[in-house]
Image: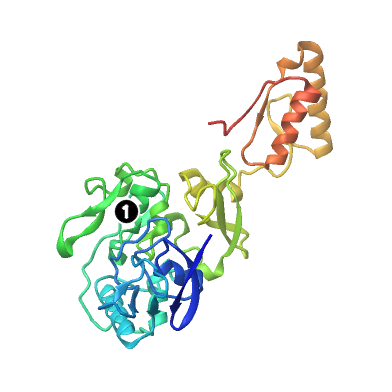
Amino acid sequence: MEFKKMTIDDREVLFEEGKTVLQVARENDIYIPSLCYHEKTGPAAKCRVCLVEVEGMRGLQTSCSLPAREDMEVYTHTEEVLEAQKLFINLLLAGGQHNCLACEANGECELQQACYHLGIEVPAFYIPPEEIPCDTSSEMIIREPGKCIKCGRCIEGCNKTVVNEVLDFGFRGKEVEVICDDNKPMGQSSCVQCGECLQLCPTGAIIDKGAKGKGRSWELKKVNTVCPYCGVGCQLTLHVDEKKNKVIKVSGVEGSPTNDGMLCVKGRYGFDFVNSKERLLKPLIRDKDGLFREASWEEAITYVAKRFTETKENNGPDAICGLASAKVTNEDNFVFQKFMRTLVGTNSLDHCARL
């Protein structure tokens, strides 16, 4: 593949044709603040925060929508660029209810990161905030419209990435807001609770209901793993409170070849079994009275082997069937089917995640 050359802040970088200036900058660890752009949703040029100066071009340009060209000279830190970026960030801050101290997105908020980069400590403008009620109707998600910056990433993700087509902009002018269906509460809409909007939101406008108040981003250890449910093998990240040994929330791994950050409702929210008080920790055997009693592993395995042998001798191998679990590894499931087919001698087995 042929690479071309351009300069960003007098630094020569290589790029592939078809990339935008923002993409080239990110690939070379050059930070340009951006709020409405995401790799999955593509250029939007709505927030105007990713402005850059380009030699030979009139006016400032949005780097998320500007194609990179050979020998292009881009500047990200000129006085004009920084003043323009600060202006748009200050307008966004003034137009919403952004309380970083109490916000669930504190530490992961892209608006907060842009403020830090630009040295904005206090908003330059003050507009008395309107009291906009939160939408808590969903079982999994809380929407806080006061923190929404109207970037449209959640809408693009809902309509084009997961193609659920629930979210859209509603109303006009300063009244514009993100709505579900025909302005229904999320819990009463056609939303399937996949959480893609939550994953793409650059601020704290859409948050995980189950994780609220249970840990800041820097307090949680991130552990990458594979979803234990179906056979797709979606990659996900567990956000773990190590002190409590508890999974607080789950997010998809962006760029994963299997799911690219997308998850279904089970993959994103169905992890409560990990810390369930009802989770079995020891083998149980049902006694003559129909009640379960705790047993050792040796006793349990011996009992199962005895009953398997009796059933096979009296009724044949097809009297036994096996149901595998999605919550064990592929290797465990392979051994299970090998056991059923080779030792038991039956093909009567299935899997709880067979779709």
Residue at 61% across, 62% down: 244
Residue drawn at the location 24% of the way across and 55% of the way down: 169
Q: Quadrant of residue 103?
A: bottom left
Left or right relative to 143: residue 209: right
User: 249 left or right of 328?
Assistant: left
Going 26% across and 84% down the picture, which residue do you hit?
Answer: 124
Q: Position of residue 148 (x, y in %)?
A: 30, 64
Residue at the (20%, 77%) spot, across then down: 127
Mark 1: give few (<14), some (14-19) or many (20+) Cα within 10 Å: many
Front residue of this view, candidates 122 and 61: 61
Residue 247 versus residue 166 in the image, above or below: below
Residue 156 seen in this snapshot: yes
Q: Is residue 208 visible?
A: no
Residue 112: which quarter of the image? Answer: bottom left
User: Horizontal and vertical percent for residue 306?
Assistant: 83, 24
User: Taking 304 as reference, is 131 left or right?
Assistant: left
Q: Where 337 falls versus 206 (above or below)?
A: above
Instruction: Please name the colour scheme applied to the rendered image.
Output: rainbow
Number of disc labels: 1
256 in relation to 64, above or below? above
* Residue 339 drawn at (x, y percent): 77, 29
Q: Is residue 341 above or below residue 197?
A: above
Locate residue 92, reporting x and y percent.
Answer: 28, 73
Task: Please tell me whether mark 1 sits on a helix, a strand or a loop.
Answer: helix
The residue indicated by pointer 1 is 155
Q: Quadrant of residue 134?
A: bottom left
In front of the other: 54 or 243 = 54
State the residue lying farthest toward the top: 315
Q: Amino acid at mark 1?
A: Ile
| Frontmost residue, 12 versus 309 | 12
